[in-house]
């Protein structure tokens, strides 16, 4: 086989933008991944390309994880294909991340629409009952699933070792849902929409200390852009006349929103840790178990009179079922999305949920349309794309002997791992 060309990819392919970079020998794990003990790695910022002596039939596997493979001159055209494919894949991953985030937004929109219908059309305000039904569904599906597991994944074994941790997690999740909904009785829609975003910087701070995530300046700019979009949405609400409720005690309502947003952040960070380190079934099963117990007790304390006043008919029952299904889908799918992205990127993506509710409200509740809604949606999506398209870093604890690993490409590295079908330890290095 002819000797490989050891070149900078940007000098080998002049149609690509010029960038500074350097070559270095591959590490042992990178050599194992490429299958070549003599491979070299060219790096420039977040871009990484390898030059190795490989067989033609291994090109798909190598290019999907290592970036560009510079083949012998006879295979040079295939090398060009590898460059284009490698550079376009991050965009495709970002599009899939956007789609997953908007799917979660639509689930949240469904819960908002059904709750508003119950409140405005039927005078039913029972947020704890609605949450209780969702936790019961999680219990029936995921907690029972854990009960039939064997070994350390068994329900009893998990409870024996970590029952108090999941009690606190269930309490945080239940109260986060309850406090945000209850805040609407005291403060204004504007306050809830704005202060609810407080959970994002709290989430980033918790991720920094607990998950050891490391952000770049562009991530903070992206978050600022997303919050600017939320501010645009609130302005559109005011201009459209939706801000007609001054609240009974704005200060109490604002405090409830801040507490609820902070508890959401705690719950999301714990969720990211559990689904990435342990399993999605364990998280949902434990939340279903302790959420059912805690929400059931709280339901009997704070909402028994409201439940007794409900004039049940098939329409009200159907709205309760629709809310429960939307919430169940949200809880079931969010761990999947968090596993391949992060809790922060998911929370940025679901900022559009209020806008979807507004768009449906144009037809269902006769809201007034404002062009600022479209502008707000665009600004939020731009910030979300900025966040996802920029590399993040996860460092090892100081006491660990494992060297720090830098994640590559975009925030949703898990999507690339799933597609390539390769072990995470190898791909993370490349």
Image (cartoon, grey):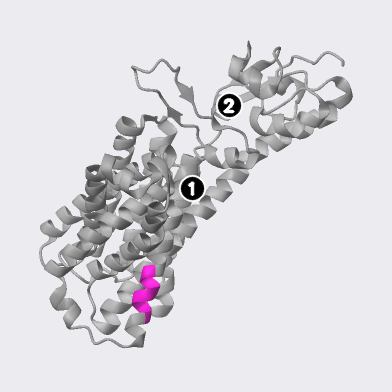
Label 2: how many Cα within 10 Å (few below 14, some 14–19, many 20+)? some
Q: Is residue 68 left or right of residue 365?
A: right
Residue plotted at (55% across, 32% down): 424
The image quarter containing residue 139 is: bottom left
Q: Element at badge 2?
A: helix
Region of the chain picked out in magenta, as a range: 318-324
Position in image of residue 405 (x %, y %):
48, 23
Is 138 situated above or below 430?
A: below
- The residue at which mark 2 appears reads as 426
Residue plotted at (15% across, 59% down): 253
Label 1: how many Cα within 10 Å (few below 14, some 14–19, many 20+)? some
Is 292 situated above or below 74?
A: below
User: Marks 2 and 1: which is nearer the front?
Assistant: 2
**Quadrant the C terminus occupies:** top right
**Which comes before the other along the chain, label 2 or label 1?**
1
- The residue at which mark 1 appears reads as 382
Instruction: Label the magenta part by its dominant secondary structure.
Output: helix
Residue 319 lies within the magenta run: yes
């Amino acid at each position: 086989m002819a000797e490989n060309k050891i070149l900078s990819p940007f000098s080998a392919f002049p149609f690509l933008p010029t960038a500074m970079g350097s070559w270095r020998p591959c590490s042992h794990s990178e050599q194992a991944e490429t299958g070549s003990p003599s491979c070299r790695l060219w790096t420039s910022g977040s871009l990484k390309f390898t030059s190795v002596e490989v067989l033609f039939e291994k090109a798909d596997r190598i290019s999907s994880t290592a970036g560009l493979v510079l083949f012998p001159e006879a295979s040079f055209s295939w090398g060009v294909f590898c460059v284009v494919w490698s550079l376009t894949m991050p965009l495709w991953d970002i599009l899939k991340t956007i789609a997953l985030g908007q799917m979660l937004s639509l689930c949240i929109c469904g819960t908002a629409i059904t709750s508003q219908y119950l409140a405005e059309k039927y005078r039913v305000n029972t947020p704890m009952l609605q949450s209780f039904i969702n936790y019961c569904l999680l219990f029936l599906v995921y907690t029972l699933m854990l009960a039939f597991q064997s070994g350390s994944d068994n329900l009893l074994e998990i409870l024996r070792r970590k029952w108090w941790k999941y009690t606190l997690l269930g309490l945080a999740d239940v109260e986060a849902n309850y406090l945000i909904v209850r805040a609407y009785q005291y403060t204004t829609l504007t306050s809830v929409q704005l202060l609810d975003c407080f959970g994002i910087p709290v989430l980033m701070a918790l991720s920094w200390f607990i998950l050891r995530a490391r952000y770049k300046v562009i991530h903070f700019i992206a978050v600022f852009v997303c919050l600017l979009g939320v501010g645009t949405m609130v302005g559109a609400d005011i201009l459209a006349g939706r801000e007609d409720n001054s609240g009974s005690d704005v200060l109490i309502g604002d405090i409830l929103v801040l507490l609820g947003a902070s508890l959401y952040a705690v719950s999301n960070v714990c969720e990211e840790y559990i689904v990435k380190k342990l399993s999605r079934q364990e998280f949902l099963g434990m939340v279903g178990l302790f959420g059912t117990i805690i929400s059931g007790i709280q339901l009997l304390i704070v909402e028994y009179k409201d439940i007794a006043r409900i004039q049940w008919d098939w329409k009200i029952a159907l709205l309760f079922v629709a809310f429960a299904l939307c919430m169940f889908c949200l809880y079931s799918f969010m761990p999947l999305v968090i596993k391949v992205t992060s809790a922060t990127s998911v929370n940025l993506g679901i900022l559009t949920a209020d806008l979807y509710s507004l768009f449906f409200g144009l037809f269902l509740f006769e809201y007034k349309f404002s062009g600022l809604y479209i502008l707000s949606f665009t600004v939020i999506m731009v910030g979300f794309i900025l966040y996802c398209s920029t590399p993040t870093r996860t460092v090892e604890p100081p006491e660990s002997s494992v060297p720090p690993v830098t994640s590559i490409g975009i925030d949703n590295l898990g999507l690339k791992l799933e597609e390539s079908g390769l072990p995470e330890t190898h791909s993370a290095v490349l």
